[in-house]
Image (cartoon, rainbow, N blue to C red):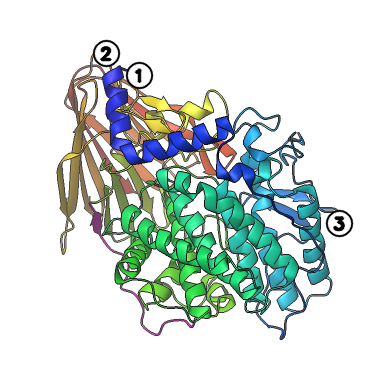
Amino acid sequence: MSIGLKLQTYRRLGLVNLARVSLYRLGLRTGWHPVQRIKGEIGGKDFFGPPPALTDLPAPSTWREESLGFGWHRTPLQGGIPDWHVNPFDGTRCSGADQPWWTLSDFDLPVGDVKTVWEFSRLDWVLAMAQRAAAGETGELARLNAWLADWCEQNPAYLGVNWKCGQEASIRVLHLALAARLLGQDAHPSTDLTRLVAAHLARIRPTVSYAMAQDNNHGTSEAAALFVGGGLCAAGGVEAGEGWAREGRRLLENRARRLIAPDGGFSQYSLNYHRLMLDTLSVAELWRGWRDLPAFTHTFRERARAAGLWLYHLVDPPTGDAPNLGPNDGANLLPLTEADYRDHRPSVQLALALFSDRAAYPADGPHHPHLAWLQVPPPAEPAAPPGSRNFSDGGYAVLRRGFWTVLLRYPRYRFRPNHCDALHLDLWHEARNVLRDAGSFGYNSGAPWDTYFPGTAAHNTVAFDDHEQMPAVGRFLRGAWLTADGVTFEPGAAGTGSMAAGYTDWRGCRHVRRVHLDEAGPRVEDRISGFTQRAVLRWRLAPGNWTLSGTTLQGEGLVLNIAADVQIHRLEIVTGWESRSYLQKSEVPVLEIEIRTAGTLTTRMGSV
């Protein structure tokens, strides 16, 4: 990629953000950064006491006999406490537990992906044990305190890899504060708990400028931790607590205003990170209400309301699943029920109750005890059913007809894109995601996975001449950001709805996609031009039995008929990969249609 394209990309990131990142890194390299001078002590054995009253709400069984990583990876606990520096996938151990966190690498570690170690230190287990203690389960309170004491002993303040990331520290703070609320101790936290939270906020505050420069959920998470954790510390007698809380409120308002578009789309172009951001705002609003604090601004509430409705319209109501778009690191801030990791309904139900005063779903289901644990009364008024919507600020258009839902992802980038998913199409039929995105697998997974999953071939779109839609500038950064043109959206009151968008990439290749949907199914027209050697359209299929006969593909209750106004050079089913959860991957069939001259491919889809 040319120097000019790189400079253009850096300019779009923003000079202020670039300066913040540069100063942060320079400060750490020279030893001048204030975060390197903080001191702190953590530890104790009485973080939480007995709840003042017991609840009859159902508590989750997670973290009783098995650990749970990234929502799917289970490891027998065998009655013991996890090793906080071990990768549970392969047993490798992270070195440097006695070294200052800033001396340790992000990526060059014995465990490979650092997130494998960070996962257990997000303290999801604190919530599960606190819920069981609140329900009167014998031994869970003692177990909770013992695990926290061990965590503090094995992770002294600011030493080791578990202190490296401000967002990871923030997730711990939010979980500890929520546990205090579940156990009725948020107004009078113990000395040990207050000291632990204060040490985390002292770590977060000096590097929050770096978090803001990322323009992603690092900023929302760290702002919420300062707001919520600061309030908890103030209640525990920490003088700096009120200041942390004020700063957190200011930054949270700023992040909601900047990172959430008026239509609810979020800066990271990711379903999983959208949920994390939304849950973070919900926790902040819950804390504000629990502590009877002044309301957030109108803009904050409107952006939070829009973000909740955005996710509501993309989630499949019968299952809670949603398109597997964008980066996904396994985050699930509020695992308060037995809901599957990919079930977004608890988060949507909470957000719509808090910010729209509407019930997204009926009372039965995992979203009901989710509200009850957080002491949120179910709204009396139901939300209007999810329908066809065009979220033009971020480039997401949804058509719904009968049993069909079609999502078209088109490029509208105000913030840095990570995946080459321009004009990706997701298809749902009778609550099943039959044409689907590949996900993201891992952030430090090595070749070929670190390029495959974010690449064009991992999405239901067209790849040109074996180059990516946008070239990689860094591990999480793309250059030559695409811009959609010719965007149309006609939901149609009855009969056929339609939508369309196009783009021209950095090498002059052009793709225009038009989608028509009626109750019989969708028709997709892909007009392709500007390439030199070949263009390949991919349809990534749900796992199952698929058969290809001529230009007709059939399987899993679906039939695809392919037509073209030029010669089809190749049409075959190949093996691809998908990742439904972090560090989990499996094979999927992929239909590839290759042409070598400009033309239009038409795919008609229907049920059988």
Asked if the residue under mark 2 is in contact with the one under mark 1, i.e. CB atoms within 8 Å, the reply is yes
Where is the N terminus found, in terms of image quarters?
top left
The label shown at residue 466 is 1
Viewer can see residue 130 = yes
Where is 347 relative to 520, above or below?
A: below
Question: Foreground: 96 or 134?
Answer: 96
Q: Which is in the foreground here, disc 1 or disc 2?
A: 1
Q: Nearer the viewer, residue 317 or 265?
A: 265
Residue at position x 55%, y 80% in the image: 375
- Tell me where the magenta segment starts and ends, as one range: 377-392
Cβ–Cβ under 8 Å for marks 1 and 3 = no
**Residue for badge 2:** 533
Which residue type carries mark 2? Gln
Is residue 381 in the magenta section?
yes
Q: Is residue 219 left or right of residue 137?
A: left
Query: Mark on residue 79?
Result: 3
Gap in Å between the C-alphas at discs 1 and 3?
51 Å
* Tag 3–tag 2 contact (CB < 8 Å): no
Estimate the spatial distance between the alpha carbons at disc 3 and disc 2, rounded to whole Å.
60 Å
* Dot placed on the residue nearer the N-terminal end, 1 or 3: 3
The residues bearing labels 1 and 2 have C-alpha atoms spaced at a distance of 9 Å
Which of labels 3 and 2 is toward the front?
Answer: 3
Name the residue: 52% across, 63% down: 244
